[in-house]
Amino acid sequence: MFNGKWSKVLSGGGESATKFRLFSYHELKVASDGFSLKKKVGEGGFGAVYKGQLTDGTIVAIKVLSVELESMRGEREFISEIAALCDVQHENLVNLHGCCVEGAKRCLVYDYMENNSLAYQFLGGEQNRISFDWTKRKNVLLGVTKALAYLHEEKSPHIIHRDIKASNVLLDDKFNPKVADFGLARLFQDGTSHISTRVAGTLGYLSPEYAISGHLTRKSDVYSFGVLLLEIISGRPIVDFDVKHGEQFLVDKAWGMHNCDGLVELVDPVLLKGDDDDMIITEAVWFMKVGLLCVQEVTKLRPRMSDVIKMLNGETSVEGVNISQPGFVADLMDVKINKKTASQTF
């Protein structure tokens, strides 16, 4: 059964598919010292990731997918990731070298990213954030924006990632961002959308319309990017807990501060320790307004990612642009209760 799907995936892969390798499980096991714990560099909802060295000396990341083939979930995610990545070429997307298909074993082989993920490097407390100066943060945001614009507007069929979040943004040796983990991605022809019976993604980053009704469009990714932008600029978690107020969601907090012209108070204070504070504040508030445009409740009001690039580059002004309210956190809370799940990928 898999062979037929595999042939279909590669037949649509174009020139990039000819560079795609089929690895043996033994080859990847040797490359990772038997998938040893000391080689393990990450773990997610769909498997563990190991650092490995191929026989030609190439350092790679080997993603070993969790075996859920009885339910076919693992197989679907595997097919989705290959279909999405075997024919994409962009400096801000992770490069897929090949895969392993042996019995129930499923592995994906990527470029190894020396600095792990944005979540690992950036969200580990104030000391981590101090190393992420304003230039690095802008570079990460612009890189992710360009990657999504490429997937949404330059690829045909276009690709919706469905799980944009800090842990799915990898960082190379120069801290350049690479969007990764396409296990939930979906491919769409222009002018089409999708109603999903199984909503997938990460609560907090999920757009309300997708979380509640399953309605999936490119604007779903735009919402997730807006949340990520606010997270990077503020240095705050997307969901925080306060003894007095309970759970506080970053999107709602940013909206409230915007309404009282207080977005400056949301700028990560570790950024403001030099002579260029005024410039950083001006740019950071500008960026957060772009983030709020991306998380507006009405999907048609959210900008395309190509327009977001222009806004972040200062080619298009956000001053005086009307920003409507974001999708309400209460809706996401309802989904969390109904789905009986925590803020994790599901």
Image (cartoon, rainbow, N blue to C red):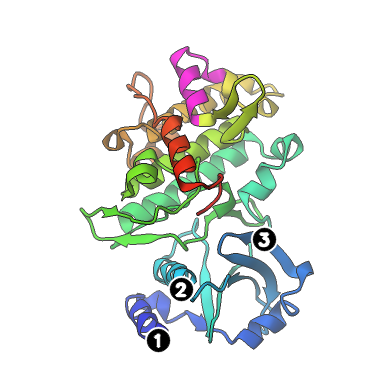
Q: Is residue 129 above or below residue 184?
A: above
**Is residue 183 visible to us here?**
yes
| Sequence order check, earlier mark of 3 and 1 | 1
Q: Quadrant of residue 8?
A: bottom left
Residue 86, quarter of picture: bottom left
Q: Pointer 1: what residue?
A: 3
Q: Which residue is mark 3?
A: 42
What residue appears at the point 28 percent right and 62 percent down from the top-left corner? 157
Q: Which residue is mark 2?
A: 75
Disc 2 from disc 3: Cα separation: 20 Å
Q: Main secondary structure of the magenta part?
A: helix
Please count the marks in the image.
Answer: 3
The image shows residue 275 at horizontal and vertical percentages of: 68, 21
Which one is earlier in the sequence, the residue at label 2 or at label 3?
Answer: 3
Element at badge 1? helix
Q: Is residue 68 magenta?
A: no
Q: Residue at horizontal 72%, vertical 39%?
A: 131
Residue 313 in sight in this render: no
Quadrant housing the N terminus = bottom left
Under tag 2, what secondary structure?
helix
Label number found at residue 344: none
Q: Nearer the viewer, residue 85 or 307?
A: 85
Label 2 and label 1: CA atoms lie apart by 12 Å
Marks 2 and 1, the one that precedes in the sequence: 1
Which portion, as a residue range, is magenta?
251-264
